[in-house]
């Protein structure tokens, strides 16, 4: 997927105004990348395809989620959390333990006027939401079982999990099944055909 194809995908799926907001986020991300290592330098010229569409493709996978917050674990540069916050009309919580990255996320939220997005500077284990998450995402944070262990206190039986897992998606699901009940399936990534996204619901320990 080229950068122009990626922009067109966003535009067609979410509209011109949100594409414009994403472009402003791109400018902020590129500027901050000179100050801290937010994303791989090799991907700076392919933000739309490698990061924005890669994040946005999670949204339709969670379309059946109940009302409530989308909790993004280990948001880092804001991927997928900021992208989701721009593209959906539900509360989004960006959970990020590192101070400099959390500061950047707050700056982005303020600059883009993302009133439904909040930044939680802490490890996910320390986060205690008032209401359980409707959706949980985590991109390149930890192995599947580790993510489930660290986040189950934020979820309930109706929560939908959307977890990009790369080439190891199915093997991580297979490894988690002896310890976790739930409905798990692997969705192929539209940006990286050899990568998978774990989609799960009804997750609970065995």
Image: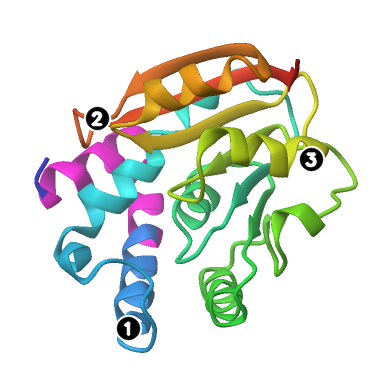
Q: Is residue 16 visible?
A: yes
Residue at figure coordinates x 39%, y 40% from the top left: 56
Is the residue 56 above or below the residue 172 in the image? below
The boundaries of the magenta stretch are: 3-21
> Mark 1 or 3 closer to N-term?
1
Is 64 left, or right, of 172 in this rendering?
right
Is the residue 202 above or below the residue 50 in the image? above
Q: Please name which of the two marks, 1 or 3, marks the residue nearer to the observer.
A: 3
- Distance, label 1 to label 2, CA atoms, is 27 Å
Residue at figure coordinates x 24%, y 30% from the top left: 190
Is the residue 20 above or below the residue 172 in the image? below
Q: SS class of the residue under badge 2?
A: loop
Q: Position of residue 104 (x, y in %)?
A: 53, 78
Is 155 left, or right, of 32 in this rendering?
right
Q: Mark 1 points at which residue?
A: 31
Q: Mark 3 points at which residue?
A: 154
Is 126 left, or right, of 19 in this rendering?
right
- Distance, label 2 to label 3, CA atoms, is 29 Å
Q: Would you say residue 43 sits in the magenta stretch?
A: no
Q: Is the magenta stretch mostly helix, strand or loop?
A: helix
């Amino acid at each position: 997927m080229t950068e122009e194809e990626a922009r067109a995908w966003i535009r067609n799926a979410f509209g011109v105004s949100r594409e414009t907001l994403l472009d402003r986020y791109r400018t902020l991300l590129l500027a901050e990348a000179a100050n801290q290592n937010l994303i791989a330098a090799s991907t700076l010229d392919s933000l739309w395809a490698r990061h924005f569409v890669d994040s946005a493709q999670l949204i339709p996978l969670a379309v059946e989620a109940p009302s409530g917050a989308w909790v993004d674990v280990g948001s880092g540069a804001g991927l997928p959390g900021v992208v989701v916050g721009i593209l959906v009309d539900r509360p989004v919580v960006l959970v990020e333990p590192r101070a400099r990255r959390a500061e950047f996320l707050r700056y982005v939220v303020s600059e883009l006027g993302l009133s439904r997005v909040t930044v939680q500077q802490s490890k996910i284990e320390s986060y205690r939401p008032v209401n359980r998450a409707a959706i949980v995402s985590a991109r390149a944070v930890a192995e599947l079982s580790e993510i489930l262990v660290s986040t189950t206190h934020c979820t309930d039986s109706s929560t939908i999990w959307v977890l990009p897992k790369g080439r190891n998606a199915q093997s991580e699901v297979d490894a988690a099944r002896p310890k976790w009940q739930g409905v798990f399936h692997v969705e192929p990534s539209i940006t990286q055909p050899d990568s998978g996204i774990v989609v799960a619901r009804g997750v609970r320990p065995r």
